[in-house]
Image: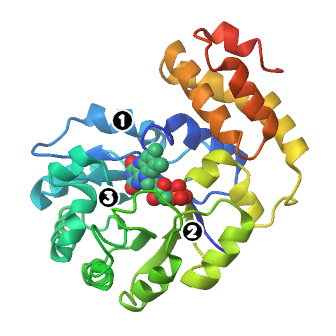
Amino acid sequence: MSRIYLAPMEGVVDFVIRDLYGLIGGYDQMTTEFVRVTDKLLPPKVYHRYCPELNTGGKTQTGIPVYVQLLGGDPICLAENAALATELGAPGIDLNFGCPAKTVNRHDGGAKLLQNPHRLFDIISAVKKAAPGQVVTAKVRLGFEDKSLSNEIAQAVDQAQAHHLIIHARTKVEGYKPPAHWEYIAKMKEHCPNTKVIANGDIWTVEDYKLCRNIAGCEDVALGRGAFANPYLAKAIKSEIPDSDSDSQWKELETRWLPQFIHKSLEFKNEHYAVTRTKQWTKFLGRNFIPSGNLFESIKRNRSLEEVKSHITF
Ligand SMILES: Cc1cc2nc3c(=O)[nH]c(=O)nc-3n(C[C@H](O)[C@H](O)[C@H](O)COP(=O)(O)O)c2cc1C
């Protein structure tokens, strides 16, 4: 049986979505949004903010482990922070070597590090040493400018003995532009024989999953935008639900999950957050569920939660 990871997405996959997707089902593992580490040990409250699941053993209420993702370029500082997150109860530390954001890259973090694969080795090794016994994983792209270092990247992660490697099959320069180059994942796998590889990028449907599995040679995948646009995608991939039951899925989304999402977002932060996030999610869901696109059009100028709620069938 394949394992399905909910890919980390800053400003998208927060505590609320992780909690909700745990309830909806199909996901085996999740990760926080990246915690940026520059030159100091962050206070515990930062880790609790990014990962409220630390209060419940590092797991969602349905028992799915949530790894804390760190982003930075300084092995010592990352190691200290990883040790703290471990002490606070994180069940795993994921290291971000894929972020394409200019500010992040300018400050020596994310995909920038892919230009020097030995830096991945140094960082993973330092983190493993500082948090003995902890599960340490890495998330990479195929390269920064081009794919010429992709095999070396895989090799560096393998030699540092990361627990697993998620490969987003694009370079930094390719951003999020389709297509994802799954064939490179298959090549990189040959260069990391001891590390489990998880394929990521552009899996929007069960058909995409099958194609990716065949090309990349990975049973296990991480779903990002595809999952946000279709919460049932993981279950569909695992064949736990009929593939084309969009009407009843939307009914369940509108009457059950959307109200819970609004309520949880309000509880987690505030009304503004709940309104903004509801617009964001309904717009994304509109890719798969036409009524959600219509709902987004009705609420996109709403400011209060009262207005938003008046458009939803509770
Ligand atoms: C809005 C957004 C935020 C993201 N934030 C993160 C992040 O915090 N950490 C990370 O490793 N990747 C992040 N990613 C990358 C995703 O995890 C994933 O690798 C990428 O979206 C490709 O997968 P997909 O096609 O399934 O979305 C982000 C992507 C998007 C679109």
Up-down relation of residue 312 to residue 40 (above or below): above
Residue at image mark 1 = 48
Up-down relation of residue 144 to residue 78 (above or below): below
Q: Is mark 3 within 8 Å of ligand 1?
A: yes
**Mark 1 or mark 3, earlier in chain:** 1
Picture residue at 40% right of the left edge, 45% below the top: 33
Label 1 crowd (10 A; few <14 / some 14-19 / many >=20)? some
Residue type of the residue flagged with mark 1: His
Residue at image mark 2 = 221
Regarding residue 124, the answer to whether it shows in the image is: no
Picture residue at 13% right of the left edge, 61% below the top: 75
Which residue is at the front of the view, 270 or 80? 270
Numbered disc 3: secondary structure: strand
Residue type of the residue flagged with mark 3: Asn
Q: CA distance from mark 2 to mark 1?
A: 27 Å
Residue at image mark 3 = 96
Numbered disc 2: secondary structure: strand
Up-down relation of residue 116 to residue 300 (above or below): below
Picture residue at 24% right of the left edge, 54% below the top: 82
Badge nearest the viewer, 1 or 3? 3
**Mark 3 or mark 2, earlier in chain:** 3
Examine the image and state in which quarter residue 159 appears: bottom left
Q: CA distance from mark 3 to mark 2?
A: 17 Å
Residue type of the residue flagged with mark 2: Val
